[in-house]
Amino acid sequence: MLVGAHEVEVFEGARPRLEAIAYRLLGSATDAEDAVQDTFLRWQSADRGLIETPEAWLTKVLTNLCLNRLTSARARRETYVGQWLPEPVFAGDRMLGPEDTVEQRESVSIAMLTLMERLSAKERVVYVLREAFGHSHGEIAESLDLTESNCQQIYRRAKQHLAADRRRVAVDAAAARKIIEEFLAAALSGRTDSLVKMLTDDAISVGDGGGVLFSLPRPVTGALRVARFLRGLFEPSAAKWELIGGRPVLFASVANGVPALVLVVEDRIAGIVSLDVTTDGIAAVHAQVNPAKLERAARQWATSGQGEPLVFEW
């Protein structure tokens, strides 16, 4: 069926919310865009005269498309080279969706998106729709063709899998810059103890190079081991510069609601290092250097105010 101006307007009005749901479900802005476009194609071919509530219909179609993608994504990640991390996006990207509540902000952090990989596909959909978007169990059950009691059980199970005893620290651009400045000063000082003081005892460092750039095959865990690793990682060397294509300029930013160190080489983002900051200190350092997962962030970076760099030539 042809799509008139009104139907396009209805879909475009729903697009930001659909993208925010899909990003939380898939951990990939690229895959989220594809899922939303597939939803539009379904909307285009549907008998829209029979659709009473377009938003509910679109959400149901999108979540089921994402369920299929999650199943195939699990198979791909079994053969993924190195460690897998979600695709980071900067503050202001509509993929992040609503960030009014603690739950909404938590649901889009790199740490939580990574943690949600533990969930089954249905657990992830139920958790995201309930926790981040406030859907009732009845609404979610209808979207997934479940009973309401089954939906409640799945939600409780998901909550148990994701249970955490820490709360992340909410940051704005100024607070993020201060944290990144302190982290960078410690990392460039060459002193392990300076970094240890900033880390939680059970801190973890994870890097995703996607097989394109080198990254460790397993996470580094424990404050001392992470501090030693970071000290070596931030030690300047010609070999590192050659690996990423030149000497980077270092910026502070906010990505997925947390402080982020952005490495820029000749106006190209070479890496985003996100810090999972809790009330006890930095609990995780997530380094995304896979070029394929930096494309959306790079487009956003090119059109936004970047601020003054922290280090002109690392």
Image: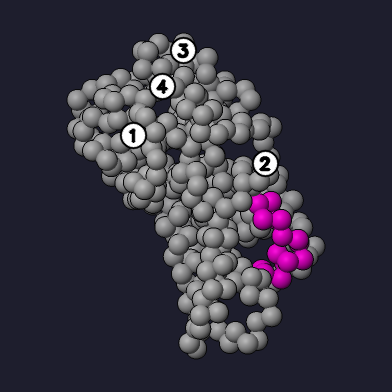
Q: Residue at x 54, y 28 (%)?
A: 175
The crowding category of the residue bearing disc 4, from other C-alpha atoms within 10 Å (few below 14, some 14 to 19, many at least 20), is some
Asked if residue 232 lies left or right of residue 58, the reply is left
The mark that comes first in sequence, 4 or 2, is 2
Q: Using the image, determine if residue 60 lies above or below residue 175.
A: below
Q: Amino acid at mark 1?
A: Leu
The residue that mark 1 highlights is: 263
- Identify the residue under disc 4: 184
Nearest to viewer (mark 1 / mark 3)? 1
Foreground pick, 263 / 126: 263
Q: To which residue does mark 3 refer?
A: 194
Q: Residues within 10 Å of mark 3 (few under 14, many from 20)?
A: some
Circle 2 residue: 102
Q: Is residue 189 left or right of residue 25?
A: left
Task: Tell me residue 180's x, y (percent).
Answer: 46, 26
For the residues bearing labels 3 and 2, Cβ distance under 8 angstroms = no
Q: In the image, residue 117 lies at what x, y percent?
A: 54, 49
Label 3, label 4: how many angstroms apart (C-alpha)? 10 Å
Residues packed near mark 1 inside 10 Å, few (<14), some (14 to 19) or many (20 plus): many
**Badge 2 amino acid:** Val
Magenta segment boundaries in residue numbering:
130-144
